[in-house]
Amino acid sequence: FFFVAAMPPSAMTDRKRKLDLGDAVSNKSTKPPSEGVGINPWTNQPYSKRYSEILEGRLKLPVYQFKEKLLDAVAKNQIVVLEGETGSGKTTQIPQFLVEAGYADQGYTTVACTQPRRVAATSIATRVADEMDCELGAEVGYTIRFEDVSDPHRTVLKFLTDGMLLREAMSDPLLSRYSVIVLD
């Protein structure tokens, strides 16, 4: 099972105002270019050849046929429960869909994805950083016990263990840094 908890976009704007973050709107494109042509909106660099190769494989994953339906469900509901076959792309693709749909605002809010084990959090973050053609620790990061490889000003997608999310909740009960929390 896969749980996604999201703030509606209107609530994210209201929360930003309450936290006095202003009404800054990201100008980043949220759609991946077809076949890797163009500029990566997160790094402002041209996409690499490897990105094109990885994108080809990503587009063949079963989860892609449900992308629009998932994003619609997340927009309309505070909690969404997903179920899918092993290897369908749930763990690596759904957090990226959420980032591409604009649920992360660089420097303000992040999409969080919990993992039950430290090794899973680090290896999945590495894989997703490759898929997004970004540097691990910059736009895609992870937090495990005794190790935080993320940047509060640049990270838009963060993988972390369940325990680290609970630890963050102790100091910030509203988890205001996160616009969406995916429990994997």
Image (cartoon, helix red, strand yellow):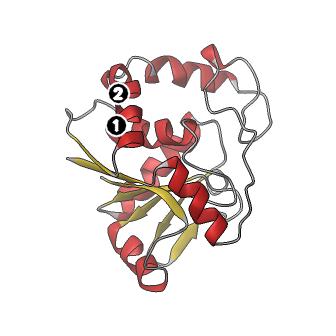
- Residue drawn at x 31%, y 63% as measured from the top left: 117
* Helix, strand or loop under label 2: helix
Q: Where is residue 65 in the image (x, y as percent from the top left)?
A: 34, 19
Horizontal relation, residue 40 to residue 126: left or right: right
Image quadrant of residue 101?
A: top right
Question: Are the residues flagged by discs 1 and 2 in contact, CB closer than 8 Å?
Answer: yes
Q: What residue type is labelled 1?
A: Ala
- Rendered view: 138 above or below 176: above
Task: Determine the residue located farthest toward the bottom in the rendered image.
Answer: 171
Local packing at callout 1 (Cα closer than 10 Å; few below 14, some 14-19, many 20+) is some
**36 shown above or below 176:** above
Tell me if residue 132 comes above or below residue 7 in the rendering.
Answer: above
Q: Name the residue under label 1.
A: 73
Q: Mark 2 points at which residue?
A: 69
Q: Can residue 150 be seen in this view?
A: no
Query: Viewer-proximal residue, 125 or 152?
Result: 152
Q: Which residue is drawn at 48% across and 35% down?
A: 97
Q: Total label count?
A: 2
Residue 155 placed where, x, y %? 63, 56
The amino acid type found where label 2 is placed reads Lys
Q: Can residue 28 be seen in this view?
A: yes
Residue 108 image-quadrant placement:
bottom right
Q: How crowded is mark 2: few (under 14 residues within 10 Å), some or many (20 or more)?
A: few
